[in-house]
């Protein structure tokens, strides 16, 4: 398996993987909306390829953390693995590769809405542990944060997703 940044040539395959994994088009459309927004980070849209076929994709983009000041932090969403390739470690490898790049860029934290059984293996913890409030009415365990090396205590407040996310 080979993990690298997306290029425009990968866009159709990324849409396909997301539509197959989620069974709907919303996430593929979300990715397109983020790409055309100022929240897009090309280095953090990663694909996993097996024998030249795109089997997985992960996207981290900027979302806002609104406290005493408004800070940009990373939101992990969406992530998808082609159904017949799931449960082979591809999703985990994408998360790890993304977090490594995020750390190298000096990002402070990554935030995700998802299953704690999956994300806690990468060091994600409930965001409430760090006074970071979810904009969603979900159980605390589902809204998680991964602290990166540049984390400082000023990173607290309420998370606000940009308009591109309204569609999901
Ligand atoms: C979530 C997803 C990206 C994981 O990719 P993957 O390549 O299957 O992940 P890995 O093989 O690295 O890890 C599989 C682990 O994820 C867990 N997992 C996967 N989907 C899960 C789910 N919906 N709920 C809980 N756990 C889940 C499995 O329990 C498994 O854990 P195990 O290794 O202890 O058995 C993939 O299942 C997928 O595309 N799902 C549909 C889309 C989706 O829900 N995306 C995430 C939300 S943005």
Image (cartoon, grey):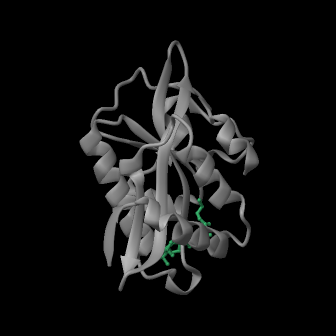
From the top left corner, tell me how far across and down residue 119 is, in percent.
48, 59
Above or below 98: residue 85: below
Residue at the spot 47% in from the left edge and 60% down from the top edge: 58
Residue at the spot 28% in from the left edge and 40% down from the top edge: 105
Direction from residue 44 to residue 111 in the image, left or right: right
Q: Nearer the viewer, residue 73 or 147?
A: 73
Report whether residue 142 is seen. no
Q: Nearer the viewer, residue 24 or 73?
A: 24
- In which quadrant of the rendered view does residue 154 lie? top left
From the top left corner, tell me how far across and down residue 116 is, in percent.
54, 58
Tell me which image quadrant ligand 1 sits in: bottom right
Direction from residue 113 to residue 39 in the image, left or right: left
Residue at the spot 63% in from the left edge and 34% down from the top edge: 162
In the current view of this chain or complex, which residue is farthest to the left? 104
Q: Which of 59 and 69 is in front in this view?
A: 59
From the top left corner, tell me how far across and down residue 2 is, in percent.
31, 74
From the top left corner, tell me how far across and down residue 81 is, in percent.
52, 73
Residue at the spot 32% in from the left edge and 79% down from the top edge: 1
């Amino acid at each position: 398996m080979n993990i690298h940044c997306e290029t425009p040539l990968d866009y159709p395959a990324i849409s396909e993987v997301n539509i197959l994994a989620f069974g709907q088009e919303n996430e593929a459309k979300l990715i397109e909306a983020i790409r055309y927004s100022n929240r897009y980070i090309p280095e953090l849209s990663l694909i996993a390829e097996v024998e030249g076929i795109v089997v997985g994709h992960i996207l981290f983009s900027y979302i806002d953390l609104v406290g005493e000041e408004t800070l940009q932090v990373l939101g992990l969403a969406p992530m998808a693995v082609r159904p017949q390739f799931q449960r082979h470690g591809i999703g985990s490898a994408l998360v790890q590769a993304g977090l490594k790049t995020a750390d190298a860029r000096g990002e402070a934290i990554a935030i995700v809405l998802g299953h704690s059984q999956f994300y806690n293996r990468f060091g994600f913890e409930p965001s409430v542990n760090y006074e970071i409030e979810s904009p969603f009415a979900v159980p605390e365990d589902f809204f998680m944060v991964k602290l990166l090396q540049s984390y400082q205590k000023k990173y607290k407040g309420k998370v606000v997703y940009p308009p591109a996310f309204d569609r999901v």
